[in-house]
Amino acid sequence: MVQNPPAPITPEDEAAAARAVLSDPVWAFITGAAGSREVAKHANREAWDEVFLGHLLPRDVSRVSTATSVLGAPAAAPFAVAPMGLPARIWPHGDLEIAAACAETGIPLVVSTMASARVEDIAKSGARCAFQLYWLRDPRARRELVRRAEQAGCSALVITTDAPVRRGSERERAAEFSPGADVAPAMTDDVEIDPSLDLADVEAVVGATSMPVYVKGVLSAATASRCREAGAAGVVVSNHGGRQLPCAVPTATALEQVVRHGPGGLDVLVDGGISTGTDVLRSLALGATGALVGRQVLYGLGRSGMQGVLGVLQRISAELAELLVLTGCPEVADVARLPVLIRP
């Protein structure tokens, strides 16, 4: 009988465990990024490591709570699983495996338009879900996706704006990655993205859905302000994990600017390079209400399916809880008061 490897205890261990069992093309699909040197992906990680925090001690931290809300849904900790396409290419029924881990841990999940399971089936897992919308060329397909997300009980609609075309990565092309004949998006047959999306379209969606609308792919305070004017409830500071624009601003850098110079009354989340509870803490200290975790979840999935994802979510949550004690923050909301130093 084949046994799963020991549970990894660091992000690097998780990546290595996944690499040991995945094929070259699938590994390239997960970890690849834009540009031959994948600069934007590496810059995300480096920027988070330049964020240093003080603490509020001495304070009574005999009890701490990581509970909060993310994208309008109750969350056991201030992060969610990012929208990611075709997890079934990594593990059979990958979307449902991720959803099962989210349901068990109380961590929300953002379901992708390109998911390899239907949002209705993912929601039946008990996971708290939001829905990510790519701006497909067929307006009827877009409207139907929004309707189905509403009926499935999704807490929010997240419109991705930073992928007017799917760029892919040099690493994927070199490894000749393909989704495979037996894996396809389950939500729609129309997977062609319309590059004409603008803020007027976002405003129209805001007026047509009962779900709060978030704009994902924001990298500047000016764009965040425009999203607020269009009626968005929030934004996700994101550079698509470094997979689109090779020279994109690191997300930690962009988050600080969006929070400092952006509009009030806007819920701000962040993704890109988030791999630890420390990164989640950093994002909160910089002013985000939550973070999204992507590649780390896929590493766990590739290693051992639902149990691997569960290990990733539990590791990040447990580390964050310990850090709340170490920084003198009994509640998640206290983290915004931490002194922040960004090393130049």
Image (cartoon, rainbow, N blue to C red):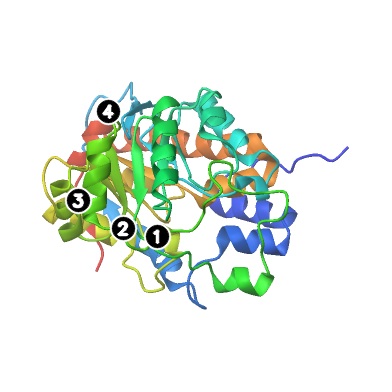
Q: Give how far apart the Cα atoms at labels 3 and 4 are.
A: 29 Å
Q: Amino acid at mark 1?
A: Asp
The residue to which callout 3 is attached is 227
Mark 1 to mark 4 CA distance (whole Å): 42 Å
**Residue placed at 22% from the left, 28% from the top?**
59
Residue 308 place in picture, x, y as percent: 63, 39
Residue to which mark 2 is pinned: 197
Say whether disc 3 or disc 4 marks the residue closer to the N-terminus.
3
User: Which SS class for mark 4?
Assistant: loop
Between the C-alphas of marks 1 and 3, the distance is 19 Å
Q: Label 1: few (<14), some or many (≥20) within 10 Å?
A: some
> On the picture, is 36 further left or further right than 59?
right
**C-alpha separation, residue under disc 1 versus residue under disc 2:** 7 Å
46 or 290: nearer the viewer: 290
Q: Residue at x 72, y 56 (%)?
A: 20
Does residue 184 appear in the picture of this structure? yes
Q: Could you tell me how far apart the alpha carbons at marks 4 and 2 are, in whole angstroms?
A: 39 Å
Q: Are marks 1 and 2 in contact (CB under 8 Å)?
A: yes
Image coordinates for residue 100, horizontal then vertical, percent: 58, 29
**What residue did someone put label 1 on?**
194
Q: Which residue is mark 4?
A: 331
Kind of residue indicated by mark 3 = Cys
Pair 3/4: label in front: 3
